[in-house]
Amino acid sequence: MQAKPVEAHLISRIGWLRAAVLGANDGLLSTASLIVGVAAASSSATSILVAGIAGMVAGSASMAAGEYVSVSSQHDTEQAELAREKIELASMPKAELEELANIYVKRGVAKDVAHTVAKQLMAKDALGAHARDELGITEELTARPIQAALTSALTFAIGASAPLLVVLISPNAWLVYAVALTTLLFLAVLGAIGSSIGGSSIAKGALRVTFWGALALALTAAIGLFVGKVV
């Protein structure tokens, strides 16, 4: 009988995928919006480029710091819960066994079978069983602060480099239109890729990201035009 191949579930990608998609989208959209806003105010090409580079560097650092702090908080909470669970397992193992068995009973397992399963799982890895079935902490979904921070910073810089490249190769008169159009195109591609990897609708993902990107670009362009006229 042929053995069933090991399945690769999409949920195992959720940690780095979330940070990567968020970083690339933010880098692309925030830098492009900054460029469009400055360009709409009739600034020089040098000023536009400097603003874009500054936005890329500041945004990458901000994304890394924000992701690290956010995910570190989640990681600290997970570790605190695991430490408390470890103490409870050492001090009252019978109560913890009953607690684990009752979890399986509530999921539809017969009471005697639930107790047998709970005993076997706790004999092998008591903390792991309670972490997974009581606390909902799994290896795939556990918080990884450094991974999230580095992924966000790198993908933000990659996303931001696209509108900066357009600034370098586009005539100044067409710069706003070129940046806006290429940004929307890249956003659609990123949305489609993210949805594809995550297993959801490609069209919906692309349309969702493109819509909000167009709105952001329109708002910054309007502000740039207004400030340029007033100043």
Image: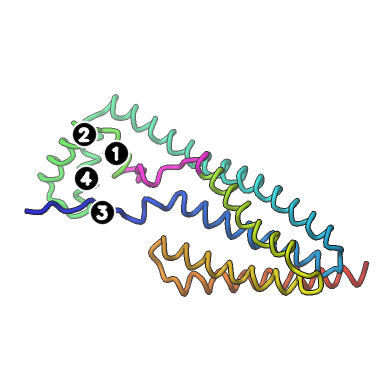
12 vs 79: above or below: below
User: What type is the residue that disc 4 sits on?
Assistant: Asn
Tag 1 residue? 130
Expressed as whole percent of the image width and height from the top left, the position of residue 9 reads 31, 55
Of marks 4 and 2, which one's residue comes earlier in the chain?
4
Residue farthest to the left, as pictured: 1
Residue indicated by mark 3: 7
- Find the distance from the CA under tag 1 to the CA under tag 4: 12 Å
Q: In the picture shown, does residue 86 fall above or below 117? A: above
Residue 72 lies left or right of residue 198; in this view the side is right
Q: What stretch is highlighted in magenta?
A: 134-147
Alpha-carbon span between mark 3 and mark 1: 24 Å
**Among the two numbered marks 3 and 4 on one chain, the one whose residue lies closer to the N terminus:** 3
Mark 1 vs mark 4, foreground winner is 1
Q: In which quarter of the image is residue 37?
A: bottom right
Instruction: Name the residue rendered at 12%, 50% in the picture.
Output: 110
- Residue, x 83% and y 62% (percent of image)? 45
Q: Residues within 10 Å of mark 1 (few under 14, many from 20)?
A: many
- Tag 2 residue: 122
Q: How far apart are marks 3 and 2 (CA)?
A: 25 Å
Circle 1 SS class:
helix
Amino acid under label 2? Met
